[in-house]
Image (cartoon, helix red, strand yellow):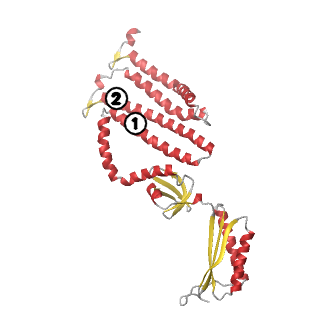
Amino acid sequence: MKNFFDIVILDNTIRSYLFVIGSILLALIFKRYLSRYIAGLLFRIIKRIAVGVDKTSFVNLVVSPLETFLLIVVSLVSIEKLTFPTILNVNIYRVSTHGIVEVLAVIIFVLSFIWLLLRIIDFIAMILHQKANATGDAKENQLIVFFKDFFKALIIICGVLLVLKYAFGLKIGSLITGLSIATAAIALSLRESMENLIASFIIFFDKPFMTGDLVKVQGITGTVEKIGLRSTRIRTDQKTFVTVPNKQMVDSIMDNLSLRTQRRAFVQLEVNSATTHEQVDQLVLSIEKTFQLRSREIENYTVFLSDINKNAFVIHVEFFTATIPPADFNALRQQMNLAIIRMLEDLDIRLATKDPEKNYEL
């Protein structure tokens, strides 16, 4: 039996092949148990900051990439004990198959490690979201989403640099120096994109609005659904999805409608100039009385004769409510408009109408 295990096939003994296969099989069998155990140990280390997040959530989030990473590590370490067969080591376009296999192994290892780090970032973001929800601070949630995407992008860039260094043997220092020069040239050509990136930092630190706010900018009114590194996504009142560059969100006049303290309704009545002063006075008093009867809904109001000309008397009608839902506000505004129409009918007052030949038809 000893001679059998010492038989050489493709520059390696059967014993070596059995060792590699056995190691990989053991990794396949025990990877889930081992990864869950390691995930549990990691959770114990960071459980002091993991307030409100249970162990199951962390394990379910990390165990899959951890399984893959452990299997790849065991496989690469085991295969490294084998000698690459000389017969298979041929050159393809001046690159040996041995070198290609080593490059692929490094790439797979780095990708699996980066995947694990990205999942850990997701877990940290989940912890911070739990803390933000506990405090009721939606601004913190907005900041968490931003920095989660930022650090993920940073880790991916580091992963690419690791692949270039350890897989392809490039000198990262020289590469970064060259890239810095190229980046400066690219930055000049992509000046608008850089401005949007800087504007995203201004939004997150100055906080003129946050996710869920109703805003009006560049003639667009809608609810902010996401604030990204380059643009802000807004769901309009017509249910369309609009992407606005962050630079415009910062440089333009932006009205955050969610921060208003009251809702305003305005009506300008232009009554016929043949209306008597008693009728005008009675109309103003009737409108004021109606507002007084709705004092629970209408916080303050203004009704007065704002202008007089030979063709019409202009009555300014304005009232304010609390920040009630739009549907309730529109219903109240409709009720008040109908009440004004009834007053005009009861007092026999006609509105001034424009005529092609005269300013107003009396």
| Amino acid beneath label 1 | Gly
- The residue sitting at 57% across, 85% down in the picture is 354
Give the left or right position of residue 228, taking residue 267 as reference. left
SS class, disc 2: helix
Give the label on residue 303, or none: none
| Amino acid beneath label 2 | Glu
Give the left or right position of residue 291, taking residue 169 as reference. right
Q: Nearer the viewer, residue 101 or 293?
A: 293
Give the left or right position of residue 297, taking residue 5 as reference. right
- In the rendered view, would you say 232 is above or below 345? above
SS class, disc 1: helix
Mark 2 to mark 1 CA distance (whole Å): 17 Å
Q: Nearer the viewer, residue 94 or 203?
A: 203
Q: Nearer the viewer, residue 226 or 266?
A: 266
For label 2, count other residues whose C-alpha is less than 10 Å away and answer few (under 14), some (14-19) or many (20+): some
Q: Earlier in the sequence, mark 2 or mark 1?
A: 2
Quadrant where the C terminus is found in the figure: bottom right
From where the camera sits, is residue 207 visible? yes
Give the left or right position of residue 322, taking residue 9 as reference. right
Instruction: For marks 2 and 1, give the one nearer the viewer.
Output: 1
Q: Quadrant of residue 7?
A: top left
- The residue sitting at 49% across, 46% down in the picture is 146
User: Which residue is tagged 2?
Assistant: 102
User: Which residue is tagged 1?
Assistant: 159
How many numbered circles does the render carry?
Answer: 2
- The residue sitting at 29% across, 37% down in the picture is 174
